[in-house]
Structures are given as structure tokens and as C-alpha cells.
Amino acid sequence: MLKATGIGIGTGATALATPTALAAPADAAGAPLVHPGLLHTRADLDRMAAKVKAGARPYTAGFAELTANRHAQSGWRPNPQAVVYRGSGTPENYAALYNDIHAAYQNALRHHVSGEEAYADTAVAILNAWSGKLTRLEGSADRFLAAGLYGYQFANAAELVRDHGDFDLERARELLLNVFHPLSDSFLSHHNNAVVTNYWPNWDLAALACVLATGIFCDERALVERAVEYFKHGDGMGSVEHAIPVVHEDGLGEWVEAGRDQGHALLGVGLMGTVCEMAWNQGIDLYGYDDSRFLKGAQYVARWSLGGDVPYTANTRKKGAIGGWSGTETASEVAGVDPGMTRPIWAMIANHYTRRRGLPASYLTRAAAKAAPEGGGGDYGPNSGGFDQLGFGTLAFTRDKVTDSVTPAPAPGSPAPGSGARPQAGVTSMASPSPASARDLAATGSEEVVGWAAAAGITAVAGGVLLLRRRDRGRSGTE
């Protein structure tokens, strides 16, 4: 159980202010997918531009982070490769891919906020260069990480310029369907021919993000449905009940990878938030699935990363190849935390639950405040871990009010919007592991961290008011 820290956990039943519908939910059978509709909708982009033009805080601080990033400059020139290697191979050149994708995304986002065409032109040139040259991803098991991470990021950058006259939409579509997606789908199906629990949640979640983003960008509804089903019921550690196998009586959901290390737990939460946000923008509410299970897991990781005590249920997991070497590994307690470690993940999650849904989430609010204003790729060190999220959440996801969103389709078993029923974000009387806790996983990867100056004395505010404060950048881990 948690020790008293003077910080409210922010659970407990609360009124849910139902958002005003700005568009029809997209998950009705036969309804077209929404574009732009990955991490950003048209309403989101218009909001960013209007807020920055008006000089509104914290949007201006978030935009300053974007314009200061070396990747967000119209003079960026791409370095496309025919074959990208990660983990092994000659040469191991995947840095060229993630740097260029982040440059494309940042230039495209800068165009939408500023209205300057030069940035859109640069984003298009980068994406066209890669779609005209890249043929495959190779390497160790890390090739699956490359496919998942850079696949969902490529799709998001491309979504922002899909209507540009010079953008080769069909070639981008072919790249996602023929190069990125097959590896990600294969991983979800076969887990690199390892036992299903060999890989920690972030491996599944990277693949899941790619499958979902590809389905949306390419208007392939079957892929969207595949991703949604895996999020809810997948066999691997990245499905929501496996990543968060225990919900405690205080309302915190135990993030299984907290028994590994902080950097990978932050990565997993960021990726699950990315999946939830992209689904939400298509009218699919994964954020609220299973009594807002992700909220409880994100609150757990936020509290833990802020230095608070959290419970952890010991678990033993299998690892190894199917039909080959196998073993077990036990995580018996929560790992230590470095208060200097961060990723640009919190603004998106905190704003969803506190601003869109009107739910209290004090640890998310504090984590978002401490990380603000969020930067993006290139602001968190030169290694790949600093490019796992697209970032810039202070600019992109800060919201004024609950009605600033599209009404999603309700999750199965949840009340329909306008029904008067209120989803519960409070205590779940379930202090024992779900059946998923018997799943096993193996340690892979490592991380580097350096400190950044922690914000102090921030008061948690129910409803999610973000008290934004600048901090130095830190490096976070690999997968």
C-alpha cells in the first residue's frame, strides 16, 4: 500500500463532462476513417495555430521548443537508405531514418502552426526521398523495434502533409504496407519465434502503434480492428491487461515493466498513450477501456517517477525461443527511479483524462508540469531513446476545456454519451493479479540517463491544470 506523501492520488468517482460532438464517431461499420486523424486532427492543428498566433501560454512556450529544434528547420536535407539496419548489420544506420522522420514531422507541424509553406515542402521532400528508396529493415530482433517505432512515426509525419500537391501519397502508403507493417504484424503474431512473454510490453506496443497508424493512414480498416483487438485481448505483454496486470484498492494500476527499470516503463506508457490517442481520433475509446485501466497504470508510473512509493507484485516470467533454450526471470520489486529521467509523454495523457474527460489525475498533472514545455526528437539526447516519441505535447495537446475534442464511440459496456451515466475512475476492488500476471517476459535492452533539473513544489490540481515549468533536457533509454 502507498505511504502518505501529501499528494492526492486523484481517484474516486467524479462527474464526467460529456464532450460536445464535433464529428461523428468513426468506428461505426462502414464509416470512413478521419484525416488528418493520427495524433492530430484538423481541430487540433487549428487550435495550435490560433493559440500561438494569439500569444497564449503555454502554447507559445511549446512552439518555441519546436522552432529551436535543429530538426524543425526548412534547410534540413534527407539521407535516405535502401536498407536500414538496427541491432546488427553493415552498416548499422538506423539513426539516419529516425533523424529524418523527426525532421519531417517537426517541419510539418511547424508548417501547420505558422502557415509557412517552406516547412511543408521540406517535410514532403524528406518523406518522398525515403519512400522512393527504402526497401527493407534488417538487423537483430531490434529490426522489429525499428519497424514499430519508425513506422508509426513515419505515418504521423506523412498524415500531416497527405494533401500537399507534391507529396507521393501512394508511395508512402506502399512503404508502410510493404516495409514497416509486415514486421510489426509478424511480431504481434509470432514474437520473433520466442515464447510470447519473452519481450517486455514496449516491444508489443511499438508494433501495435505501427499497425494502428498504418491502418489509419492507408484507410485499411482491418488493420485498425486488428490493433484494437490486440490492445484489448492480445497474448503478448503489450495488451492492456498484461502491461497492467494488477489494479490495487487505492486505484493505482501496477505497470509490469516497473519491475525492470524506469526508462522502459516510461517508454511503454508513452507508446500506450500514443495508441490510445490515435484510436480516439478515429472515435475509438481505448483510453477508457476496462474502467480506464490505462489511466490507473499511467498514474502509477507518474507517481513512481515522481519519487512516490508504489506497490509491486512479484512475478516470474518465462523467456527463450520456442523449441529452444528457455529460462525464467523474476521481478520481485519495483525498480529504483532517477528523478532526472523524463520523456515527452505526459501532456497528451494528462490532457486527455483531465481536460477531455474531466477526471482527476493528480500524478499525471504533476508529471506533465514537471516535464513542460515538452520538446521532441533531438531534445533528449542523440541516442535512439531520445527519439522514441514525437513529443511537443505542450504545444499539441494542451486543452482549454472538456469540450475541446471529438466525442469517441463508447467502450464496450460503457454508457453512451448523453445517457447521464458517469464512468467511474475511482477505486477498483481488485488487489490480486489478473490471469495475465502469469505471463512471462525476458529482459532486453539497456538505457542511459543523465539528470535534468526537477521542478519542485508543484501543487496537484484536480481537473488537470498544468503548472508549466522549463527544465533541462535528459537522455532516456533504448528499448
Image (cartoon, grey):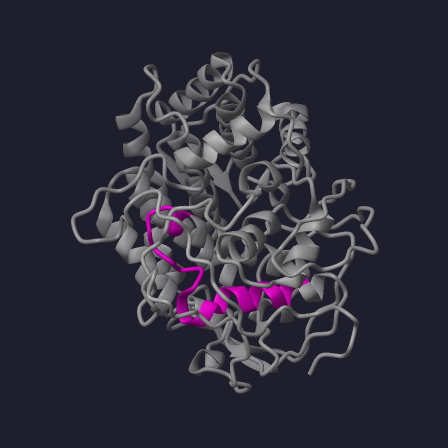
Q: Residue 133 sits in which quadrant?
A: top left
Q: Is residue 407 visible?
A: yes
The vertical placement of 145 against 248, above or below, is above
The answer to whether residue 320 is magenta is no
Is 431 positioned to the left or the right of 135 in the image?
A: right
Residue drawn at point x = 61 percent, y = 51 percent: 346
Q: Main secondary structure of the magenta part?
A: helix
**Outermost residue toward the left?**
30
Residue 178: % across, % down:
29, 39
Viewer-closest of 137 and 403 = 403
The vertical placement of 138 against 301, above or below, is above
Q: Residue 426 sits in which quadrant?
A: bottom right
The vertical placement of 8 against 347, above or below, is below
Residue drawn at point x = 80 percent, y = 50 percent: 455
Residue 184: % across, % down:
37, 50
Magenta segment boundaries in residue numbering? 278-302
Residue 216: % across, % down:
31, 43
Is 265 positioned to the left or the right of 137 in the image?
A: right
Viewer-closest of 319 and 108 = 108
Q: Is residue 197 visible?
A: no
Residue 336: % across, % down:
75, 67
Residue drawn at point x = 60 percent, y = 25 percent: 54
Residue drawn at point x = 69 percent, y = 83 percent: 1
The answer to whether residue 301 is magenta is yes
